[in-house]
């Protein structure tokens, strides 16, 4: 795996004890972990309540460790999150302040989310949401001018693995790709330039497509509001495959209604499911999908999840650095 962040753990005196908790676990994981680490004690629990006694002397856990469980887990040293980017509900004050290492499944959804983002870009550039509505009404609508992608600029906010793969796909269609990321200092392949977050306002007026691939952090919540939407070109499009709360939804609705931007494609929302009375449903210049950009396929994503979890178990047992460590300071 590329660009792996690692932290070390101290070697365990005895094979570790692990609790596998909901959500999104695989039934075969305990067996696979025990095969990789002979002697490891691994139990799978259908609910958090079932693990209340077991977790008291567990060394590590997979899944969502609730505040109640965490308060009982006095020996816990490592948690493997179930997600590539753990949701805000995963984090709580005691976990953030502890020295418990958290790892995630970063990288396993790169191609899935990037393909979804590109599908959004292509659909918006050819006005497919509007044509689809005309088709439903059996209408032969007027021809609309398409966005010529080789002359278009895409601004990608978030240049991690998904952002870099999205950049590659956009560049394949001739688009000029610019990125924003707080950590990436030099442009990855296919990205013309990378800028810090404070440069966002100055880049919005030149972007034809704004693609959000950011986690939800204190810095990104409500990042795209009315002021920033007004900085965008009237011909530009917003694509969000990151987190719903990064966009002020009411401000986006107003910007779309007033043609401050040309359209939007959204896979994530402030409230999910998107309420049936939301104006976004009926807007001809909006494309909506129900948070499926990272929908796993039948093989590749489950296999990748297993591989990362098992490898981290092996590393934990040997006292080696874990892969995909999360910087908890980002959550404060």
Image (cartoon, rainbow, N blue to C red):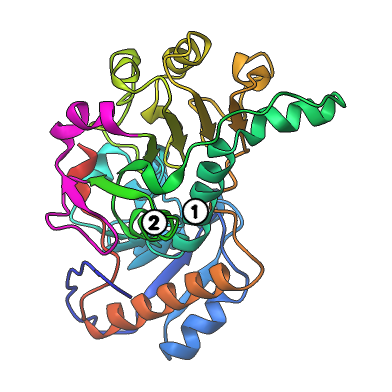
Which picture quadrant has residue 299? bottom right
Foreground of the two, 260 or 78? 260
Foreground of the two, 162 or 201? 201
Q: Quadrant of the N terminus?
A: bottom left
Q: Is residue 93 among the parts visible in the rendering?
A: yes
Q: Eyeballing the image, is 275 above or below 183?
A: above
Residue of label 2: 162
Q: Is residue 237 left or right of residue 227?
A: right
- State the residue at coordinates (17%, 54%): 184
- State the residue at coordinates (41%, 53%): 170
Foreground of the two, 54 or 191? 191
Give the structural element (helix, strand or loop) at label 1. Answer: helix
Q: Is residue 305 left or right of residue 324?
A: right
In the image as oriented, which residue stretches furthest toward the right? 138
Q: Eyeballing the image, is 316 above or below 211?
A: below
The mark that comes first in sequence, 2 or 1, is 1
Give the structural element (helix, strand or loop) at label 2. Answer: helix
In space, the residues marked 2 and 1 are separated at their CA atoms by: 7 Å
Image location of residue 227, percent across then percent down: 28, 14
Q: Is residue 249 a member of the stretch shown in magenta?
A: no
Image location of residue 28, percent across then percent down: 61, 76
Q: Are marks 2 and 1 in contact (CB under 8 Å)?
A: yes
Q: Quadrant of the C terminus?
A: top left
Residue of label 1: 113
Image location of residue 194, percent across then percent down: 18, 49
Q: Is residue 58 among the parts visible in the rendering?
A: no
Q: Which residues are magenta?
A: 181-207
């Amino acid at each position: 795996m590329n660009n792996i962040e690692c932290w070390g753990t101290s070697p365990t005196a005895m094979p570790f004890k692990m609790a596998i908790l909901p959500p999104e676990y695989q039934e075969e994981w305990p067996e696979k972990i025990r095969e990789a680490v002979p002697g490891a004690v691994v139990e799978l629990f259908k609910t958090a309540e079932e693990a209340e006694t077991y977790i008291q002397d567990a060394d590590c856990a997979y899944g969502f460790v609730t505040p109640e469980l965490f308060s009982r887990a006095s020996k816990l040293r490592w948690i493997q999150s179930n997600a590539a980017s753990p949701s805000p509900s995963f984090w709580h004050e005691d976990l953030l302040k502890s020295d418990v290492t958290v790892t995630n499944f970063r990288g396993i959804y790169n191609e899935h989310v990037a393909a979804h983002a590109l599908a959004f870009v292509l659909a918006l550039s050819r006005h497919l949401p509007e044509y689809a509505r005309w088709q439903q009404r059996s209408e032969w609508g007027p021809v609309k001018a398409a966005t010529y992608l080789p002359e278009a600029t895409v601004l990608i906010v978030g240049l991690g693995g998904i952002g870099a793969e999205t950049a590659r796909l956009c560049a394949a269609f001739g688009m000029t790709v610019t990125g924003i990321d707080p950590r990436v200092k030099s442009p990855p392949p296919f990205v013309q330039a990378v800028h810090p977050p404070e440069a966002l306002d100055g880049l919005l007026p030149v972007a034809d497509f704004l693609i959000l691939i950011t986690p939800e952090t204190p810095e990104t919540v409500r990042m795209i509001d009315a002021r920033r939407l007004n900085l965008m070109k009237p011909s530009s499009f917003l694509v969000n495959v990151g987190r719903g709360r990064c966009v002020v939804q009411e401000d986006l609705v107003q910007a779309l209604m007033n043609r401050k931007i040309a359209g939007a494609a959204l896979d994530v929302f402030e409230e999910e499911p998107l309420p049936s009375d939301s104006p976004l449903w009926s807007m001809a210049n909006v494309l909506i999908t129900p948070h499926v950009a990272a929908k796993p396929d039948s093989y590749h994503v489950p296999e990748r999840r297993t591989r990362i979890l098992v490898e981290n178990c092996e590393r934990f047992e040997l006292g080696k650095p874990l892969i995909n460590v999360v910087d908890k300071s980002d959550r404060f």
